[in-house]
Amino acid sequence: MKKIEAPHTNKNSSPLSVLMFFSELFHLVEQPNVYSQQHLDTQARPSRPMPDITLPDMMTFVALTLQMGHALTDTLHDYWLRLRQLHNPFYGETMTRDRFLQILHFLHSAYNSQRPDEGEEYDRLWKLRTVFDKLNEAYAKFCNPSEHLAVDEINVKFKDRVIFRQCIPKKRKCFGIKIYKLCDESGYIYDLRVYLGRDSHSATDDCKTRNS
């Protein structure tokens, strides 16, 4: 089968440019540190504070998370197993399990104090809005849209409680968060919209309007 390559790359599509884009998201290092301190302040008993997350810590965390997509395991803890038949030294040598889980637990992208008022214009995705805006900005920057585009939906597995979690019995991952995406024939994503419980047509129309 002939491999389909993205035919609409531009001068911004180099691997280095894409890597540097992720550095723009590393401003998130400030948020976990603030959230961690807020968590400690609410504890009845004093506990040992977590060392501040640094820029190298966040870069390592993101790199490990991307790598995990190429080596799936049953649980997150399995990446640090010491059983001989399952041991992979890469993860333990790169970052300790406890440090990785600490960063994951306190990962934040917005100040809790900046929670918007719950009115008609309330954004249910306000804690992640900055991340999604950055992603959509990068999708448009690194590749020019082709003539053949389609809007598709995916259901990202999610079992925790959130008001816009969906249950789609016909999907293999029936419980999750529905995301609409605008793609070309190669599978490249140009836009993402999370379904937040409103009219589903508004999300698809928004993708088409932004990229028309």
Image: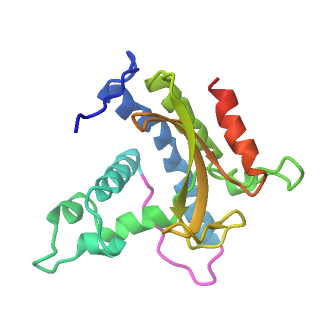
Residue that extends furthest to the front in the rendered view of this protein? 1
Q: Residue at x 50, y 27 (%)?
A: 148
Q: Position of residue 178 (x, y in %)?
A: 61, 57
Q: Main secondary structure of the magenta part?
A: loop
Q: Residue at x 59, y 73 (%)?
A: 160
Q: Is residue 32 above or below residue 192?
A: below
Q: Position of residue 39 (x, y in %)?
A: 60, 69
Q: Position of residue 179 (x, y in %)?
A: 59, 51
Q: Is residue 58 left or right of residue 109?
A: left
Q: Position of residue 85 (x, y in %)?
A: 11, 77
| Most foreground residue, 182 or 169 | 169
Q: Is residue 183 left or right of residue 15?
A: right
Q: Residue at x 55, y 70 (%)?
A: 174
Residue that extends furthest to the top in the rendered view of this protein? 11
Q: Is residue 206 above or below residue 118?
A: above
Q: Residue at x 52, y 26 (%)?
A: 140
Q: Is residue 45 above or below residue 149?
A: below
The quarter in which the C terminus is drawn is: top right
Q: Is residue 93 left or right of residue 39?
A: left
Residue that extends furthest to the left in the rendered view of this protein? 84
User: In this figure, which colouring scheme has been used for the structure?
Assistant: rainbow
Q: Is residue 146 left or right of residue 195?
A: left
Q: Is residue 140 above or below residue 150?
A: above
| Highlighted range, magenta | 42-53
Query: Does 119 lie within the magenta span?
Result: no
The quarter in which the N terminus is drawn is: top left
Residue that extends furthest to the bottom in the rendered view of this protein? 45
Residue 2: which quarter of the image?
top left
